[in-house]
Amino acid sequence: MFLLKELPSRQMMDRYGSRYPDMDVQAVEDALTMMRRASLLIRDLEAYFSGFNLSLLRFLILIVIDREPDRASLTMGEIGERLDVSKPVMTRTIKTLEGDGLITVTQGGQDKRSKVITPTERGKHALDEVLRGYFKLISAFMQAVDDH
């Protein structure tokens, strides 16, 4: 999360630019603006997901499985490769999703440590419900960016 509410003024950026010759003032200003907007979007998404008893991570786990066109499940390791979270956080989140009845966790073949994650019908329905407003929220965000 980008916590800076008020971005530096152009005057301040120019002052830093004169002190640090390798600084591309416009690039830094653009990056800070992008980070601030992304932070606001993430905040809006988290608030939206909470209305469905989800978090961004819980949503991402469901969507990562759903985006595989020829597969109905992924191993926990495959999900971990696609998301930037620690193994303990992933394990806790998977347990929560399972406890809420949104996924099932089964043993993955001969390797007893491997876990296969499959969305339940309830999980598929929840994802479908969330995606309706998610795409609307993303579209509104991008429209606002384009209007600037």
Image: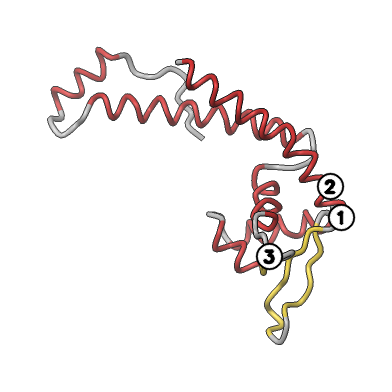
Identify the residue at image location x=60%, y=66%: 78
Query: Measured along the vertical axis of the image, is residue 61 above or below residue 4?
Result: below
**Coordinates of residue 67 in the picture (x, y in percent):** 65, 54
Q: Which residue is mark 3?
A: 70
Q: Which residue is mark 2?
A: 125
Give the left or right position of residue 143, taking residue 18 as reference.
right
Is the residue under label 2 in contact with that under label 1 (CB below 8 Å)?
yes
Q: Quadrant of residue 139?
A: top right
Q: Which residue is mark 1?
A: 121
Q: Quadrant of residue 115?
A: bottom right
Q: Nearer the viewer, residue 79 or 133?
A: 133
Label 1 Cα neighbours within 10 Å, binned few <14 / some 14-19 / many ≥20: few
Residue type at mark 1?
Glu
**Coordinates of residue 70 in the picture (x, y in percent):** 68, 65
Instruction: Give the Cα distance between marks 1 and 2.
Output: 6 Å
Query: Circle 3 sits in a helix, a strand or a loop, which is it?
Result: loop
**Coordinates of residue 71 in the picture (x, y in percent):** 70, 66
Residue type at mark 2?
His
Give the left or right position of residue 6, taking residue 123 as reference.
left
Identify the residue at image location x=66%, y=67%: 76
Q: Nearer the viewer, residue 29 or 71?
A: 71
Query: Measured along the vertical axis of the image, is residue 6 above or below residue 129?
Result: above
Identify the residue at image location x=28%, y=14%: 10
Instruction: Give the Cα distance between marks 1 and 3.
Output: 17 Å
